[in-house]
Structure formats: C-alpha cells, structure tokens
Amino acid sequence: MSQANLDFSESTTSSRGQYRGRFAPSPTGPLHIGSLVTALASWLDARVHGGTWLVRIEDIDFQRNVPGADRDILATLDVLGLIPDEAPQWQSTHLSRFEQALEQLQANGSLYPCGCTRREIADSVTSIDANGHVRHQTLIYPGTCRNGLHGRPPRAWRVRVPDADAATICFNDRWQGTQCQNLAETVGDFVLKRADGMWAYQIAVVVDDATQGITDVVRGADLLDSTPRQIYLQQLLGLPALRYLHVPVVVNADGEKLSKQTGARAINRSQPLAALTEAAQHLGLDIRAGDVEEFYRDAVPAWANRLARLTTAA
Ligand code: GLU
C-alpha cells in the first residue's frame, strides 16, 4: 500500500497559528440547550481570540443521522446569530480523506485488521471476582487480533496503542486542567474503521480538524476521555497539536448528559435571547441583555473574564 500523506491545501489559505475554532454537531436531532452551550462557547472563544469560527456537520454515522437535522441545526444557529465565518462542511462529502489517513497508518505499521465481534470482546473482558460475581468492565480491547486473524475474516481496523508503560498521554485542558490517560489501560487498541464500513469518530475528527487548519477545540466535557486517543492519532499521522477546552456538560434532573435520548427539547427559535441567556448561564456568564446584539456585546468580554478566572484558579 502506498504512503499517502494528508493534504492540507485547504488550511494553507490562513496562516497556521492564527486561531481557528469549530462547532462540530452530529445531525442526530435539533439543537438543544446542551449543544447550544458548546456552540456558544466555541463561538465566544473564537471571537475573544480574534479568530475564525467554523461549523462542521459530523454526519458519517449514517445509522444515527436524522434526515433534515443538519439544516435544522444550521437554521437555528443562524437565527441565534451564530454564523460561521466560512461555508459549513459536511464530513460525509470527503470520506476519501479518512481512507488516506488509514493508508498512512497502515504503511507505518500502526494498524491491523480485527476479526472479533463485539460479543467476543465483551466476553473476554468479563471477569469473575473473588466472591464469584461477574464484573463487567469497560470494553478495553484485549488485543486478540494483534498478531493475526487466526483464520477469521477481517471485520474492523484497529490502531495499535503502545504497551502500558509507554501509553500515557497527558494534555493541558484550558478549563479542566491537566489530564492524563493511559491508552493501554483504559481503551486498548481502538477501532478506526468499523465492521459495517463506517469511519470511527476518532479518526474522522482528527483528520478534519487538521485539514481545516483548526487550532482550538472547544466542546463538551463528555469528550474529554476521547482526547488522548485523538492526540495519539495526531502524533502517529504527524499532525499539529491542538489546544483543548472542554466545557462542563449540561445535565438533566437525573444527572444524565442532556441529549435527545434524555429528553432535551429543541431550542425555541422564536426566543433567541432567552436561549442564549440560558446557555451563557451554564458557562458561568450572567448576561442580562435587552436584545441579541447587546447579548453578544456583553458576552464576549464576559467570556474573556471567565477565562482569566480559570487561569487564575489553575
Ligand atoms: N460530533 C460530536 C458530537 O456531536 C462532537 C465532535 C467534537 O466536537 O469533537 O458529539
């Protein structure tokens, strides 16, 4: 297989280093307060840094896409005044980029085909404790296919992570502080291309952030534990390091992350100021504005102050 390095021609239009942020919703339903908080935080952070703000529709999990949700999200952002500085992109329109990255990883020996079913992996990581109770652990891939498929057909593609003594990835999150994760002990070799042929979020997000010249990722803290995997892929692919800021996620009364599944209601487009004010509150910004224009005028310096307080607290 030929060595194919990723093409960054798209990102050379802006000088690297100049702030470029993004909001990357999956079109699984309308924008709700949880996703609005992320959108607003990434927009404010781009504004405070005099940067560029992009929107990327992450629509590569075809089973989860809801028809029309992409347009609905963009229309709501528009009504709220969260308007991207460049035309939105749809991840599904450039799948060949992910294939190129996969080839690059294959050429440097980081990748292997896996024939395990989800069931087999679940069985092999289930252990019996001293009292005879079955303990279900998170699905850390036990490395069954690392040294060959044992005659089984390939199903998915996995990237090899280093052995535990060399697998710790640390990064400094601008909101959450220093974060470290041992990839071998917490995830194991992870899937980049699934058995159903779909691309995994981890590879798609890394490739697209690099191709679009993103410098700063601002998103929900539910993705904090994905970040070390993404940093590891950036390192393997020779891509630039990014800065990260993970905002606390909005939870419902039961403490669950707000999503369509946990009963999040769509943002009411007829009340943009109310929606923005509520989103700002979740970020610790107390904005009392008379209209949307005034809201943004006050919210940008308020975000700068919020960041300054985070830095002082660290
Ligand atoms: N598409 C992901 C989501 O909606 C977010 C990806 C990201 O910001 O890295 O949860």
Image: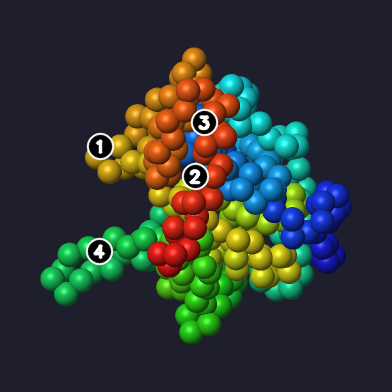
Q: State the separation of the CA atoms marked 4 and 3.
A: 50 Å
From the viewer's perspective, is 293 left or right of 182? Answer: right
Q: Earlier in the sequence, mark 1 or mark 3?
A: 1
Residue at the spot of label 1: 253
Q: Residue at x 66, y 70 (%)?
A: 235
Q: Earlier in the sequence, mark 4 or mark 1?
A: 4
Pinpoint residue 305: horizontal percent, then vertical percent: 49, 51
**Front-most of 96 and 288?**
288
Q: Give the class, few, some or many, for how many residues have Cα within 10 Å of label 4's Cα (few <14, many ≥20).
A: few
Q: Residue furthest bottom?
A: 165
Residue at the spot of label 3: 295
Q: Earlier in the sequence, mark 4 or mark 3?
A: 4
Q: Nearer the viewer, mark 4 or mark 3?
A: 3
Mark number displayed over residue 302 = 2
Q: State the separation of the CA atoms marked 1 and 3.
A: 27 Å
Q: Earlier in the sequence, mark 2 or mark 3?
A: 3
Q: Are marks 4 and 2 in contact (CB under 8 Å)?
A: no
- Mark 2 residue CB less than 8 A from any atom of ligand 1: no
Vertical position of residue 262 compared to residue 266: above or below = below
Q: What's the residue type where badge 4 is placed?
A: Arg
Residue at the spot of label 4: 135
Q: Residue at x 61, y 32 (%)?
A: 82
Quadrant of res 73: top right
Vertical position of residue 98 compared to residue 171: above or below = above
Q: Nearer the viewer, mark 1 or mark 2?
A: 2
From the viewer's perspective, is 215 left or right of 290? Answer: right
Q: Nearer the viewer, mark 4 or mark 1?
A: 1
Q: Give the class, few, some or many, for how many residues have Cα within 10 Å of label 1's Cα (few <14, many ≥20).
A: few
Pinpoint residue 51: horizontal percent, then vertical percent: 70, 48
Mark 4 falls on what kind of element? strand
Q: Earlier in the sequence, mark 4 or mark 2?
A: 4
Mark 3 falls on what kind of element? helix
